[in-house]
Amino acid sequence: MGLIDEIKVRGATFRVTEEALYAEALREVEAGQRRDGLWAKALTECTMDVQRAQALYLKLRVQSLKDEVAVVEQHLKQSSSAIQSHGSSDRQSPKPRNSGLTSLKKEIDYQLNGTSELGNAFAKWLGLLLLALVLAGFIGIIFGL
């Protein structure tokens, strides 16, 4: 694959991912879930105009979701050596909370349904990322990270 094709694929991947993140943020709002800190920021930046703040809140929440994924990815990189050095633990860990990642994966699967090999590869990559997020929860619980 040439450089231009790679750039096109990265752009398409970004847009599909961002669309799924906006869908997840909208689902949260419709379900009455709201991050008070983000809501307060949206209100202050929109001088207390509620309609404008609602639109800004979605943008802020999408960025927050992206940031959460980045933090987990970094945590996984740092934790991989801890897992290898400590081995497996026999302690039973509680299940991590579902933070909407399952519905995010479903939305992305829906968006990619019937797409090319690239779409299937992206869906597999996303599935692995979601698995990594769940494992990160277990790692944090087991090792107190």
Image: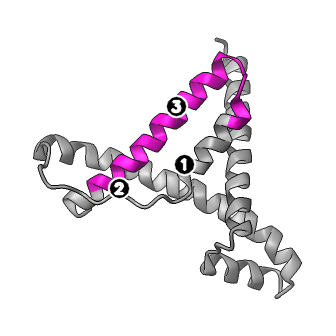
Residues under labels 2 and 1: Cα distance? Answer: 14 Å
Percent x, y for residue 142? Answer: 21, 57
Residue 47 image position (x, y, % from top left): 83, 87
Seen at 78% across and 69% down, the residue is: 56
Identify residue for label 2.
137
- Residue 117 vertical position relative to residue 23 in the rendered view, above or below: above
Residue 137 in magenta? yes
Query: To which residue does mark 1 refer?
Result: 102
Q: Which quarter of the rendering shows the C terminus?
A: bottom left
Find numbered disc 2 in the image and state the secondary structure of the residue it sits on: helix
Q: Amino acid at mark 1?
A: Thr
The disc placed on residue 125 is: 3
What are the residue bounds of the magenta stretch? 110-139
Which numbered disc covers residue 26? none
Residue 92, quarter of the rendered image: bottom left
The answer to whether marks 2 and 1 mark residues whose Cβ atoms lie closer than 8 Å is: no
In the image, is 21 to the left or to the right of 84? Answer: right
Q: Is residue 70 magenta?
A: no
Residue sitting at the far bottom: 48
Say which quadrant the N terminus sits in.
top right
- Label 1 vs 3, first from the N-terminus: 1
The answer to whether 45 is drawn above or below residue 101 in the figure is below
Rendered position, 144 above or below 71: below
How crowded is the residue under tag 2: few (<14 C-alpha within 10 Å), some, or many (20+)?
many
- Residue at disc 3, secondary structure: helix
Foreground pick, 138 / 84:
138
Q: Residue at x 69, y 46 (%)?
A: 20
